[in-house]
Image (spheres, rainbow, N blue to C red):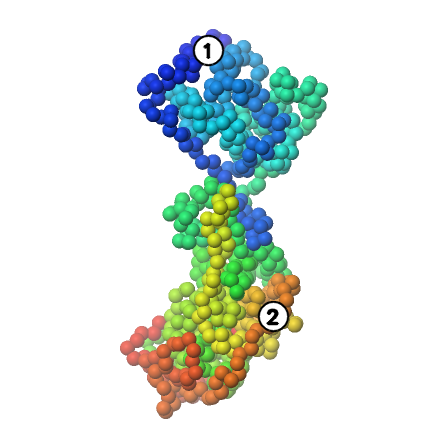
């Protein structure tokens, strides 16, 4: 019965062959409207674009990640394929490919005859041209009409491309199993070799995988794969492409035991941020107008994406975090972001949330969550606003604490601020910054005007929404480490702000530049004011709260930050060549760090130590560069900052300007106030005029 069924099929296909033969041997019949629409033969066919994964590289050109959404592919040219590999594929799939036309009637007849008689010949009835049409133009459905269309399109394709062009396209298209599309990927997957290094036995195995990738899988069905490979070697002998002695020797070669296909693993945090930005930023619209189109481009267009990542810095950052953060079973972690302040290139990133996964919360960028309170590491923004308004680092302010502020219609009331240690009394702004004295800075903020602080934060790089409340002066508003890195980089580059970026260029598969990225920068602060501020921030590291960050022989500027109940610890610092922001806490929420490794976590403890460990390594190969000194003649003389309720105090500060030489205002816009002493707590009452002040949160312990 089985033989009878095959004979019937032979008769049916014989009739089909006669019809197709008429089309091929009598071109005049090719205009029959039954098969071909008028004019289609002269219209070039469009083959489906092959899906090649995009590759993401670091700044030094090292491969970081391969997008593999649509299979594994390594494109090759026919010139890269050695003769023994070509012979193996042709002898198994289409021996007379270069001699026959689009359809080989003899091959079809031979395949049908072998099928009926149960022969072992491997060569099938479809030519390589037909297989290319099936893989790149038609759908996989098996119908008579589709088979006729396949024949017609094969005829058209051979009028459009040379035989060698068709073979190259075929070798890049055909599926070899185990996720490998094309012979380049197959050589790497099964043997971890480039295609030009394949032996004849290896080439024969790949050839028989085309016929049946699943049934001939050497990992799942090694016995069948071995038998079919040896038949292929015999067939190469039959076609005089191999001697029998060579074939016998090749049959002794073992099959591969493991797959070398690159594993599809989760991208690193840095790579994930690159992907996220490509999908969401308008800068990448050239890759597609929608996120789905851009994701398809990443998975299929073979893009070459070069990033700003310095893999050496990244490894050193990871090592510093691992070394310094005590083992808390993952509860408390650290985030780090490092960027070149002169360009905005982000060179290292540790997310601060090792288990964040795809689409999860990344502390550095705030993606998937929110920012964190920066505590006293926000004070350099206040200092920049003070200097812009004409304040001097030698100005005297009362730092006595605790202090409290009564704000109508705001809870809690009174708003109480603590210093890390009580007292302090009168001090310069430089001393208040170095020792991170909260009461001094909240008073400075009230005198300056909290709206001016918000404006300065946005000018320097903070994009998160901020509320103008007194506590903002000591970092009560959520921001991200990446935003703070941009703020501090502005100070590192002498007042020029560079927007952080993660990719330098994106090329198409042919090397054509599609996107070139840079951040030329814009001056937002005067060089003189920044030079003054950098001097003040060096004092933090020299003798203030950030001494743990000091690197012998280098000038370091930075600021510590600690929030209320020790829930967040920060150290942000820089040299002229490199800026780094470090955060430590619980990524799951604001959890007190009162006992981590036996100590409460201030910004000057583990965060400053992480910064020191990382920056010592990162800067080791860079020359020592000092900060440019300010012009002392342009620094206003020190004065006592008059409380806002004193007689003759200015009640409306001047508008924000880039350069300031006038004395500062001593109260915030639209406010008046009275200050009184209650025991050891200094109370300032602030009355608003027609404004509503949001709730105050995040008083902070004030150590910095």
- Per the image, the residue denoted by label 2 is 625
For the residues labelled 1 and 2, the Cα–Cα distance comes to 84 Å
Marked residue nearer the N-terminal end (1 or 2): 1
Q: How many other residues sit within 10 Å of disc 2, few (<14), some (14-19) or many (≥20)?
A: few
Task: Give the percent coordinates (x, y) of residue 182.
Answer: 53, 33
Please say if 621 is above or below 677: above
Q: In which quarter of the image is residue 119?
A: top right
Q: Percent x, y for residue 592? A: 51, 67
Residue 191, visible in the rendered structure = no
Residue 417, label in figure? none
Q: Residue at x 44, y 45 (%)?
A: 295
Image: 204 above or below 670: above
Residue pictured at 54% horizontal, 10% vertical: 117
Q: Please name the residue shown 43% across and 83% down the image.
A: 661
Residue 488 lies, in percent from the top left, at 50, 69
Q: Quadrant of residue 248?
A: top right
The secondary structure type at the circle numbered 1 is: helix
Where residue 411 appears, x then y in whole percent? 36, 74
Q: Residues within 10 Å of mark 1 (few under 14, many from 20)?
A: some
Say above or below: 59 vs 614.
Answer: above
Evaluate if marks 1 and 2 touch, with contact meaning CB atoms under 8 Å apart: no
Rendered position, 83 above or below 75? above
Q: Badge 1 is on which residue?
A: 10
Left or right: 353 as drawn, with respect to 664: right
In screen coordinates, is 69 left or right of 468?
Answer: right
Numbered disc total: 2
């Amino acid at each position: 019965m089985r033989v009878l069924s095959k004979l019937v099929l032979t008769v049916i296909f014989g009739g089909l062959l006669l019809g197709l033969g008429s089309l091929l041997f009598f071109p005049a019949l090719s205009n029959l409207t039954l098969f071909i629409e008028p004019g289609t033969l002269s219209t070039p066919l469009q083959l489906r674009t092959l899906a090649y994964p995009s590759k993401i590289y670091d700044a030094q050109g090292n491969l970081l990640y391969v997008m593999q959404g649509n299979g594994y592919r390594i494109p090759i040219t026919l010139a890269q394929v050695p003769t023994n590999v070509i012979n193996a594929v042709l002898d198994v799939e289409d021996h007379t490919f270069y001699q026959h036309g689009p359809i080989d009637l003899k091959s079809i007849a031979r395949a049908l005859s072998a099928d009926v008689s149960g022969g072992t010949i491997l060569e099938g009835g479809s030519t390589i041209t037909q297989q290319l049409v099936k893989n790149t133009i038609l759908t996989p459905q098996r119908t008579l009409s589709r088979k006729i269309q396949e024949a017609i399109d094969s005829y058209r394709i051979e009028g459009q491309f040379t035989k060698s062009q068709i073979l190259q396209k075929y070798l890049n298209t055909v599926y070899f199993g185990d996720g490998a599309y094309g012979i380049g990927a197959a050589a790497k997957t099964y043997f971890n070799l480039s295609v030009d290094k394949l032996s004849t036995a290896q080439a024969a195995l790949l050839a028989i995988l085309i016929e049946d990738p699943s049934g001939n899988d050497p990992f799942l069905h090694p016995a069948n794969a071995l038998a079919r490979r040896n038949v292929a070697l015999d067939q190469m002998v039959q076609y005089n492409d191999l001697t029998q002695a060579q074939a016998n020797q090749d049959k002794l070669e073992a099959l591969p035991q493991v797959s070398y296909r690159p594993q599809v693993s989760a991208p690193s945090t840095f790579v994930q941020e690159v992907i996220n930005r490509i999908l969401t930023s308008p800068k990448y619209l050239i890759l597609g107008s929608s996120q789905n189109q851009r994701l398809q481009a990443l998975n299929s267009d073979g893009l070459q994406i070069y990033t700003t990542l310095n893999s050496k810095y990244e490894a050193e950052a990871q090592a510093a975090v691992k070394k310094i953060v005590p083992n808390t079973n993952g509860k408390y972690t650290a985030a780090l972001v490092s960027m070149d302040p002169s360009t905005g290139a982000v060179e290292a990133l540790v997310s601060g949330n090792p288990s964040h996964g795809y689409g999860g919360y990344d502390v550095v960028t705030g993606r998937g969550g929110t920012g964190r309170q920066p505590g006293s590491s926000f004070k350099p923004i206040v200092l920049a606003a003070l200097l812009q308004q004409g304040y001097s680092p030698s100005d005297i302010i009362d730092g006595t604490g605790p202090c409290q502020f009564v704000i109508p219609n705001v809870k809690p009331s009174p708003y109480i601020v603590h210093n890390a240690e009580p007292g302090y009394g009168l001090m310069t702004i430089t001393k208040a910054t170095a020792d991170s004295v909260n009461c001094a800075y909240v008073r400075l903020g009230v005198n300056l005007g909290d709206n001016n602080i918000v404006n300065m934060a946005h000018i320097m790089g903070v994009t998160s929404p901020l509320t103008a409340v007194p506590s903002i002066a000591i970092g009560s508003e959520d921001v991200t480490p990446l935003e703070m890195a941009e703020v501090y980089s502005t100070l590192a580059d002498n007042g020029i702000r560079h927007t952080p970026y993660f990719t330098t260029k994106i090329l198409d598969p042919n090397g054509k530049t599609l996107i070139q990225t840079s951040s030329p920068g814009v001056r937002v602060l005067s060089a003189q004011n920044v030079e003054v501020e950098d001097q003040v921030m060096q004092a933090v590291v020299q003798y203030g709260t950030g001494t743990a960050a000091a690197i012998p022989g280098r000038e370091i500027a930075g600021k510590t930050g600690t929030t209320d109940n020790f829930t967040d610890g920060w150290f942000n610092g820089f040299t002229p060549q490199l800026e780094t922001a470090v955060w430590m806490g619980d990524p799951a929420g604001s959890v007190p760090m009162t006992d981590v490794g036996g100590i409460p976590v201030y910004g000057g403890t583990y965060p400053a130590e992480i910064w020191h460990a990382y920056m010592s390594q990162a800067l080791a190969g860079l020359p020592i560069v000092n900060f440019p000194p300010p012009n002392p003649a342009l620094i206003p003389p020190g004065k006592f900052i008059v409380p806002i309720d004193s007689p003759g105090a200015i009640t409306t500060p001047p508008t924000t300007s880039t350069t300031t030489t006038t004395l500062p205002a001593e109260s915030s816009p639209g406010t008046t106030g009275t200050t009184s002493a209650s025991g050891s707590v200094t109370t300032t009452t602030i009355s608003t005029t027609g404004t509503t002040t949001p709730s105050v949160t995040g008083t902070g312990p004030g150590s910095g």
